[in-house]
Amino acid sequence: MAPKKVQPQGAQTLEQVEAKFAAQTTGFYEKCMDLNTPQSAVCVAANHLLTLRCKLLGMYGVAPDAKWTAAGSAGAPAQGGVGSEVQWKSKLTETAAKKAARPLTKGEFVYNTTAVDETNKSFTSTVSGSLLSKKYSSVEPQISKKLAEQTAARAALQAEYPEAYTELAAHEVALAPAKGEKRKSDPLPMGDKNELNHMMQMLLSRSVTKDDVLYTLTTIEGEKPSYSATVSLPTYEGSPTFQGAPASAKKDAEAAAAKVAIAAFKDAAAPLIEEHKAKKARKNAEDMEKMKQKHAEKQAAGITA
């Protein structure tokens, strides 16, 4: 009598992996539809999704694609590959040292990290150094000082060493959560501008283009220049325009204007967003059932993929 196969403690069940695959499919769709999502982030999401799909197929008894496994995406973890996340600060230092053909000394890259407000729950960081052509800052406020510095280093690496950045970004995968710890959502917040774009996508019932959401900046002169921004929605009914509060940085001024628009459309967009999520969930469930049925039919017919 064959021994009973025991599932390793802590291993995910087929139902859990199916649910995770459905959720990541929805997340990937949202990233693709949001034209403000960086191409590198879409590549990362695609890598996550394909890796999980390979795992799911394996649980169905279907052999994974040899080329996909050989590439490292579904095989053993590699540096910057599955099972690891890119440490952008260290990669920036390593790449700069390689280009300079010498080891770097402590302090050649300086990170200036500050809290966004008095709550000390959001942080921004700027990295500077003699090997950089200019200062680089984190794209959005982050939930920790470490994340803020990592995103600043990432911005610097992307601008100064694009070839190295592209290679690293293509293989970036988030760390698996520790046992008993829930996986956090995307560490980079959506941001007010992206959230407004998503709202407009729902309200217009189509993908948003650059002509649908327009920002206008005005410089406010003073001892320290500041900025004021308006956001206009020319393709929406009434072509509304919203004025944001002044800010010390251009991107913050635009985000402030977006925040005002978000508040104005929140009630109208909320049911559409929920309906969109429900529709995607239903489609994912239907697609999952079709895929399961297809593989079950192949197995019953003795066909191996």
Image (cartoon, helix red, strand yellow):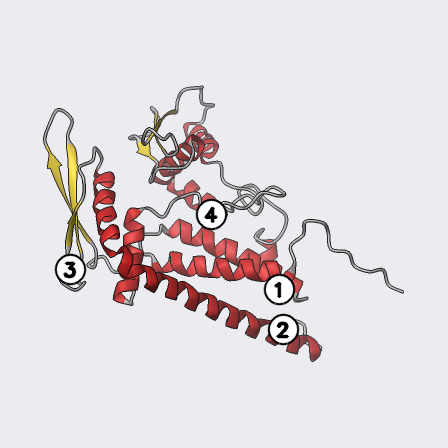
Measured Cα–Cα span from mark 3 to mark 1: 46 Å
Helix, strand or loop at mark 4: loop
Measured Cα–Cα span from mark 1 to mark 4: 25 Å
Helix, strand or loop at mark 2: helix
In front here: 275 or 285?
275
Helix, strand or loop at mark 3: loop
List x then y, in percent, for residue 258. Answer: 24, 48
Measured Cα–Cα span from mark 2 to mark 4: 31 Å
State which quarter of the image contains the N terminus. Answer: bottom right
Residue 227 is left or right of residue 26, and the answer is left
Q: Is residue 156 above or below residue 243?
A: above
Write down the quadrant of residue 100 in the picture. Answer: top left
Q: Is residue 94 above or below residue 81?
A: above
The residue that appears at 36% across and 35% down in the rendered structure is 156
Query: What's under tag 4, amino acid-wise?
Result: Ser
Query: What's under tag 1, amino acid-wise?
Result: Leu
Query: What's under tag 3, amino acid-wise?
Result: Pro
Helix, strand or loop at mark 1: helix
Q: Is residue 300 above or below residue 78?
A: below
Q: Are marks 1 and 4 in contact (CB under 8 Å)?
A: no
Which residue has dot 3 on it?
Answer: 234
Between circles 3 and 1, the one closer to the viewer is: 3
Measured Cα–Cα span from mark 1 to mark 2: 9 Å
